[in-house]
Amino acid sequence: MRRILAIFLSVVMIGALWTYPTATAVDASAKSYVLMDAGTGTVLRERNADTQMLIASTTKIMTALVVLEHAEPDELVEILPEAVGIEGSSMYLRAGEEMSVRDLLFGLMLASGNDAAVALAHHVAGGIEDFAALMNEAAQELGMTNSHFVNPHGLDAEGHYSTARDMAVLAARAMELDSFAEIAGTRSIRAAGRSLVNHNKLLWRYSGAQGIKTGFTKAAGRSLVSAAERDGTRLICVTLSAPDDWNDHTALYDWGFAHYRYHGLVAAGELFATVPVISGVSDQVALIAEEALSLLVSPEDEVTLIAHTPRFVYANVRAGEQAGTLYAQVNGETVLEVRLLYGETVDLDETIRLDFWEELKWQWDMIRR
């Protein structure tokens, strides 16, 4: 019956009805960058986002993610000679000492310890090559189609690369893990007898900054992957080969938060509409949204709600059954949908007699249920 009697109920809401602060045009020094909404994956601004590039120590985001998926933070790690004296940034491990995975992750993410990366790789996978295989498996699962990893620390190597878009996807996933977000957002800590200070200056400089990882080699230039949140909106920013990365991220975040924000269109359980009920103890039934429906939009976006619902229904009507579907469109393209449910039960009123065709229709509806 719902298919036969489905109608289209459109409610048009123009983005200009919502008031936003004005933001000036923004650019960045980065050769490649992405500004992305973490919740939806919507890219708000980009340049050369799919160009394969060296990513230096931002590699360690993937290293930390793989470690957290394959080891417990309290596991003890014996530091092997292979993890000592690795070139570049270090937390100065000593062969034979023991420390927890958690402490090594702090050394990895705050001090950018290349030695911590190697120690964790050996602990989880028994060596660099096998650990890199786990990194590439994770990249494939995340849809990072333009990325390939050959080591856990990000030192320049043939076949080790990613893109700004892929790194934004990785960062959004990693920040969903509370354990990762806690470590990446820590400014300083004493771990394993070492004082560690986060290299990410945005944690001090930018309101709402949450992490996550810096990177630099001479060949790669300055790389930075960060996250910031305001008013429930979390944005991810990635800059690769960016001489002025701190200011790049500040400017991009200021622009993003000024131009985009979430707006709730329908709350979970909210009354959306009513539908007439034939032969019921009540003459109408409420339709409610099964889940909340919200969108990240700009002032220029035209947002349209389209509800496919029956024109009327026959009793009995049961609360919780699907009554239709509510679609949200942005500039004419459907981006989200949510089921509309009957919000209450409406029983058949036995005193109301149906004619032959109404009775036939009611019997057919009961069979289909």
Image (cartoon, rainbow, N blue to C red):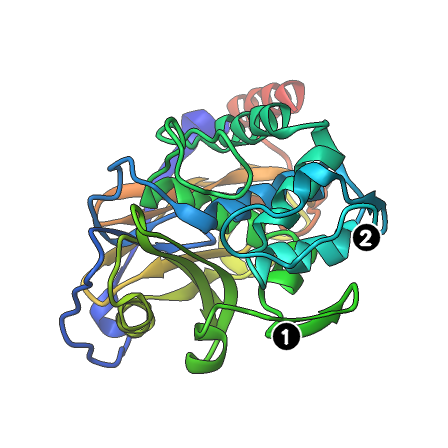
Kindly identify which numbered label has been placed on residue 100: 2
Tell me which residue sits at (27%, 78%) in the image. Answer: 19
Work out how far the residue at label 2 is from the one at label 1, CA to CA, in angstroms: 17 Å
Tell me which residue sits at (32%, 73%) in the image. Answer: 250
**In the rendering, at what x and y percent does residue 368 appear?**
62, 20
Tell me which residue sits at (18%, 63%) in the image. Answer: 300
Amino acid type of the residue tagged 1 in the rendering:
Ser
Mark 1 neighbour class, 10 Å CA radius: few under 14, some 14 to 19, many 20 or more: some
Q: Residue furthest left?
A: 25
Picture quarter with the C terminus: top right
Q: Earlier in the sequence, mark 2 or mark 1?
A: 2
Amino acid type of the residue tagged 2 in the rendering:
Ser
Kindly identify which numbered label has been placed on residue 318: none
Would you say 5 lies left or right of 288 here?
Answer: left
Would you say 76 lies left or right of 10 here?
Answer: right
Task: Label 1: state its secondary structure.
Answer: strand
Task: Label 2: state its secondary structure.
Answer: strand
| Front residue (pair 36, 51) | 51
**In the rendering, at what x and y percent does residue 53 appear?**
30, 39
Mark 2 neighbour class, 10 Å CA radius: few under 14, some 14 to 19, many 20 or more: some
| Front residue (pair 87, 262) | 87
Examine the image and state in which quarter residue 301 appears: bottom left
**In the rendering, at what x and y percent does residue 291 appear?**
57, 51
Q: Are marks 2 and 1 in contact (CB under 8 Å)?
A: no
Would you say 18 lies left or right of 39 here?
Answer: left
Q: Badge 1 is on which residue?
A: 188
**In the rendering, at what x and y percent does residue 297 appear?**
31, 61
| Front residue (pair 290, 320) | 290
Tell me which residue sits at (41%, 65%) in the image. Answer: 262
Q: State whether residue 303 appears in this view.
A: yes
Q: State whether residue 318 appears in this view.
A: no
From the viewer's perspective, is residue 186 above or below residue 357? Answer: below
